[in-house]
Amino acid sequence: MSQSLDAYLAVSGILFAIGTFGFLARRNAISMLMSIELMLNAVNLTIVSFGAFIPALNGTASVIALMVMAVAAAEATVGLAIVMAIYRNRRTPLVDEYDAMRQ
Amino acid sequence: MPIPDTVPVLGISWGDVLFLVLAAVMLGSALLVVTLRDIIRCGLAMIVAFGALAGIYVLLGAPLVAAAQVLVYIGAIAVLILFAVMLTQAKNAPARLVFQAQALPAAIAAIVLAVMIGLTASATDWGAATKRIATGTDALARLMFNAYVLPFEVVSVLLLMAVIGGIYLARREGREA
């Protein structure tokens, strides 16, 4: 089981679906950012498992995974700064109360 | 005393047992991340999920990616998120309504998505080897600093831009930085 690509792909597919659910269903902006991190991790797991099972992709997959991690760190920095800036103005972390553009 | 090739009672290999345990821990704590009410506990469950994923990377023969996972995700991103939680969660925050009204359709969509990904991945012939290939750290370093040195530099510039942008966004208005 640990020697077949399909098992790793299935695990990462389930992880991605859990992240999708969290992003769509949670009200708290920081919970939504956590769900995005879960989805990015699922994609990274897919990339690394392709690299481990397809010989032509062996080293390249790890390089791509490290790049994805760096971009995820940048995304978390900017995303959390945006959440903090909105929180200072609206005094709430709940995304369904950010309705200034709807009024 | 030599370790036997398979797990004594279960009769399956050690790699399979490790994979099952790590995948169960990772998926279980990921479910806790999206369902727990207390957001601090969500963050702690996220750290557990990242750690189990680092174990899966080791199992896949990518030790450098596993080390970067621990350093970047557990050491930096999780701590950053926990800081943001402590700065934005008021004591009187509503704890009852964690989910949006669209939570049930979102759950159905997520289950459909997981089934679709699973079916597609298992139905496709990826031309995969039947055995894992480990990635040596020295080979990875040669690849990264020869063929991929330009993306590496671009990523460092991107990180610098993100840091400056983060400071600018988080700065308080009306006061000189």
Image (spheres, rainbow, N blue to C red):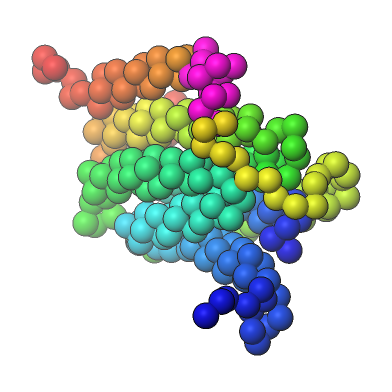
Majority secondary structure of the magenta segment?
A: helix
Quadrant location, the N terminus of chain A: bottom right
Q: Is residue B54 above or below residue B4?
A: above
Quadrant location, the C terminus of chain A: top left
The verdict on residue B78 being magenta is no
Task: Indicate left or right for A57 with A16 as reference.
Answer: right
Residue A40: quarter of image: top right
Residue B28 rendering spot, x and y as whole percentages? 54, 65
Q: Nearer the viewer, residue B157 or B136?
A: B136
Q: Can residue B68 be seen in this view?
A: yes
Q: Which of B131 and B160 is in front in this view?
A: B131
Residue A2 rendering spot, x and y as whole percentages? 69, 60
Q: In this view, does A45 lie above or below A84?
A: below
Residue A43: quarter of image: top right
Residue A99 rendering spot, x and y as whole percentages? 42, 34
Q: Which of B51 and A89 is in front in this view?
A: B51
Name the residue located 35 percent from the left edge and 35 percent from the top edge.
A80
Q: Nearer the viewer, residue A81 or B47?
A: B47
Name the residue located 58 percent from the left edge and 67 percent from the top edge.
B18
Q: Is residue A59 above or below residue B114?
A: above
Name the residue located 37 percent from the left edge and 43 percent from the top edge.
B71
Q: Which residue lies furthest to the left in this view?
A: B176
Residue A66 rendering spot, x and y as whole percentages? 51, 33
Task: Indicate left or right for B68 with B82 as reference.
Answer: right
Name the residue located 52 percent from the left edge and 33 percent from the top edge.
B138
Q: Which residue lies furthest to the bottom in this view?
A: B9
What span is in magenta?
Answer: B140-152
Q: Report the number of discs.
A: 0
The verdict on residue B147 being magenta is yes
